């Protein structure tokens, strides 16, 4: 809690105490005036005291309550009455009705035992949830719509009491979704680890701040749940589309085109005189026999396996769905090309990179912008933009 919040709390507290002191003095004066027969001053003072009290209750009490950390209260949790609980309450209601109507001491004793069981249930449930700490481990990155592993450790920091029958799940306001884990018993000063799979629906940076722990212990009358802090962060990469949904037919991925210059290709470029630094494997024996001089072969260079991808962030707020599809296409193209050994240069109006991790991380966090300028890299082999009719493939540069 920072200093500004603490200062605000003290300010609200002192203001409310001062106003309540004024209200108390007004109330005392109203009482004294009433006893002495001064009706008008007594009424005015009473209304003033009541108005100040209402003002403090409406204005200052909610502010102070909002700054209080209520999680330390063991009984402050989310409760849901189970079917067994409703049956138990029905039995208690019947016993209450019978005890009042018959005045039977035995029924009052039974009612006391039933209410004691309810109190014991709340106490044991509170002890069961005390001193529990959750540690969550997730990968630093994942892909949208694809499951990834998640590991949850529950530490029971109680020295004498075990923790019974708890279920672990995602908090209601958490974007992470994973199946529930059930732990039947955690011994004192022990921990248990559960692993499973989680999923994120969309790209972006996500922070897992809490996990929900619920239990029906001890008697199953209530399902009690509390959120426990857990610090974990993950960058969700865009969805990788299937390769058959991408149109890469116009891009030379295999380096099969030759340039008219020396290189290490397969086609003959020229025959020249042999020099001592040349390899004997490249000697052209037929030409050497005809000219009575050693001749060597040179080969044409293959087209470089370099691809420049231009990605345009331009779009309007109504183009979010199309932009998300464009981001997935860009991520998929870069992923498949780099996987096949192609050197990729990814260019936008604000960023440039070449390795797959940095490209996917940029695409996971980039946002559509109506003021983005079109990227203008040299020799772009592929251009992805929403400015025209949709994504388009640029002519491949030689």
Image: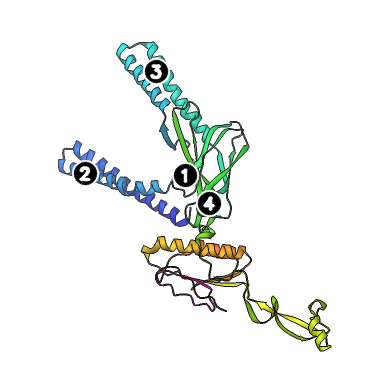
Quadrant of the frame with the C terminus: bottom right
- Pinpoint residue 235: horizontal percent, then vertical percent: 53, 57
- What main secondary structure does the magenta stretch of the protein show? loop
- The alpha-carbon separation of the residues under discs 1 and 3 comes to 37 Å
Mark 1 vs mark 4: which is more N-terminal? 4
- The alpha-carbon separation of the residues under discs 1 and 4 comes to 20 Å
- Pinpoint residue 312: horizontal percent, then vertical percent: 46, 70
Choose mark 1 or mark 3, whichever is in front. Answer: 1
- The alpha-carbon separation of the residues under discs 3 and 4 comes to 54 Å
Q: Magenta residues?
A: 369-391
Between 18 and 344, the residue placed more toward the observer is 344
- Res. 175 visible in picture: yes
Residue linked to disc 2? 47
223 with respect to 25 (left or right): right
| Image vertical order of residue 309 relative to residue 71, above or below | below
Residue linked to disc 1? 171
């Amino acid at each position: 809690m920072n200093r500004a919040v603490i200062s605000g709390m003290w300010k609200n507290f002192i203001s409310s105490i001062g106003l309540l002191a004024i209200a108390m003095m007004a109330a005392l004066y109203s009482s004294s005036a009433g006893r002495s027969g001064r009706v008008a001053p007594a009424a005015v003072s009473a209304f003033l005291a009541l108005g100040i009290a209402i003002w403090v209750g409406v204005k200052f009490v909610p502010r102070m309550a909002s700054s209080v950390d209520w999680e330390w209260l063991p009984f402050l949790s989310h409760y849901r009455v189970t079917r067994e609980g409703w049956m138990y309450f029905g039995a208690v209601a019947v016993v209450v009705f019978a005890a009042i109507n018959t005045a039977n001491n035995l029924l009052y004793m039974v009612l006391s035992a039933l209410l004691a069981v309810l109190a014991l249930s709340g106490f044991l449930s509170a002890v069961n949830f005390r001193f529990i700490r959750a540690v969550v481990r997730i990968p630093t990155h994942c892909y949208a719509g694809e499951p990834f592993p998640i590991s949850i450790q529950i530490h029971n920091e109680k020295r004498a009491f075990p923790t019974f029958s708890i279920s672990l799940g995602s908090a209601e306001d958490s974007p992470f979704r994973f199946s529930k884990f059930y732990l039947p018993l955690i011994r004192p000063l022990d921990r248990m680890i559960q692993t499973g799979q989680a999923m994120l629906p969309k790209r972006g940076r996500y922070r897992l701040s809490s996990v929900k722990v619920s239990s029906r212990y001890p008697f199953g009358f209530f399902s009690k749940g509390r959120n426990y802090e857990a610090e974990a962060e993950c960058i969700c990469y865009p969805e990788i589309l299937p390769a058959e949904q991408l149109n890469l037919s116009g891009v030379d991925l295999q380096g099969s085109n030759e340039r008219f210059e020396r290189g290490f290709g397969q086609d003959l470029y020229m025959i020249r005189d042999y020099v001592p630094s040349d390899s004997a494997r490249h000697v052209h024996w037929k030409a050497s026999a005809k000219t009575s001089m050693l001749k060597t072969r040179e080969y044409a260079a293959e087209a470089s396996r370099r691809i420049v991808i231009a990605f345009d962030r331009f779009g309007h707020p109504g183009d979010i769905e199309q932009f998300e599809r464009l981001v997935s296409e860009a991520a998929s193209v870069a992923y498949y090309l780099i996987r096949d050994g192609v050197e990729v240069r990814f260019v936008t109006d604000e960023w440039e990179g070449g390795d797959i991790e940095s490209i996917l991380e940029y695409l996971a966090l980039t946002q559509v912008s109506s003021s983005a300028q079109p990227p203008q890299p040299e020799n772009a082999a592929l251009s992805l933009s929403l400015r025209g009719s949709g994504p388009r493939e640029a002519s491949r540069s030689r």
